[in-house]
Image (cartoon, rainbow, N blue to C red):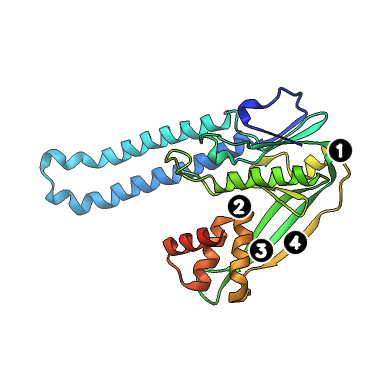
Amino acid sequence: MKLYKTSGLPTLPVEAVVKKQPLIRLVTGFFLLAVLLLLVGAIAVLCLPMFSEWLPSELKGWGRYPLIAGVLLFTVLFAVILRSFFRASNWLLKVTPDSLLIKFRSDYNAQLPEPHPTVLELNYSEIDWARYAREWVRQPGLSSSSSAYYRAHYLELKLNLDNQAKEALSEALKKEINFSSRDAGGKTVFNHYPVRFENSILRVQWWAGLRPRITSLLEILKFKVPTEFPVEIEKDLSQITPGEVEKTVQELVSKGDKLRALSLARRHFGFSLAEAKEWVESIS
């Protein structure tokens, strides 16, 4: 096992790359920006008759300007999204002839400084097996009597690392989870952590738009490591007792799931967002 910063990655032949596909991101971005543009235009059209009678005659035609501004905003944001498709950081996992490269910094945080390693290299001899895991989590809803289901997809890798390597990997992941806006020079840090490590199992999260899919990747990996049958995992966070909240929150934070930890704290103790954040940080 080796840990790297992205700037220090070795040049290796790559057989497959898991990343967000440009077409999927393009269609999603186009749809969202089109909705935004239509919303701006609709507001302008609805508001113009309400205020036009009080406007001076020289400002009567002002209604076209919000639409122009919307078009310009659409163009700029579309260009930003399009550019992100092709940046070097748009990858999660790379398959090489002798090892796997796994980037545990989210692509959402690609613009941040990198004072610590964010890429893991695993030799295939360090992987006992690989499998597809679907996780269903029942969590508290917005009201006290409701609940919501959250589904996640993971590539799970059972690792056979020595204690020193396990500690090094856990410490690297912890540094990334604890990397804050203050460490990033005031830049926004998104709470998205696609890689977790617990009980010798490395869990790599798949989300919408990642290609190839987990099943397709396992078809590639089966020639390099043993593969197991898919598993279904169910968790219920809506029925935990007050005495279990602190332990559950600590587990969620250790896995990088800060948003769910905050939600759980607010639900059980009635905290405001600021109070929940302070409490979660105090026990983490």
Could you say which disc has been placed on residue 125 in the image? 1
Find the residue positioned furthest to the left.
56
**Is 6 left or right of 269, judged from the image as shown?**
right
**Quarter occupied by residue 90:** top right
Q: Amino acid at mark 3?
A: Val
Q: CA distance from mark 2 to mark 3?
A: 15 Å
Q: Secondary structure at mark 3?
A: strand
Q: Amino acid at mark 1?
A: Ser
Residue 9 percent across, percent down from the top left: 67, 27
Q: Quickly name the residue at label 4.
A: 233
Give neighbour class at mark 1: few <14, some 14-19, many 20+ (Cα, 10 Å).
Answer: some
Q: Amino acid at mark 4?
A: Ile
Looking at the image, is mark 2 or mark 3 earlier in the sequence? 3
Could you say which disc has been placed on residue 137 in the image? 3
Q: Quickly name the residue at label 2.
A: 256
Could you say which disc has been placed on residue 222 in the image? none
Residue at 14 percent across and 51 percent down: it is: 53
Give neighbour class at mark 4: few <14, some 14-19, many 20+ (Cα, 10 Å).
Answer: few
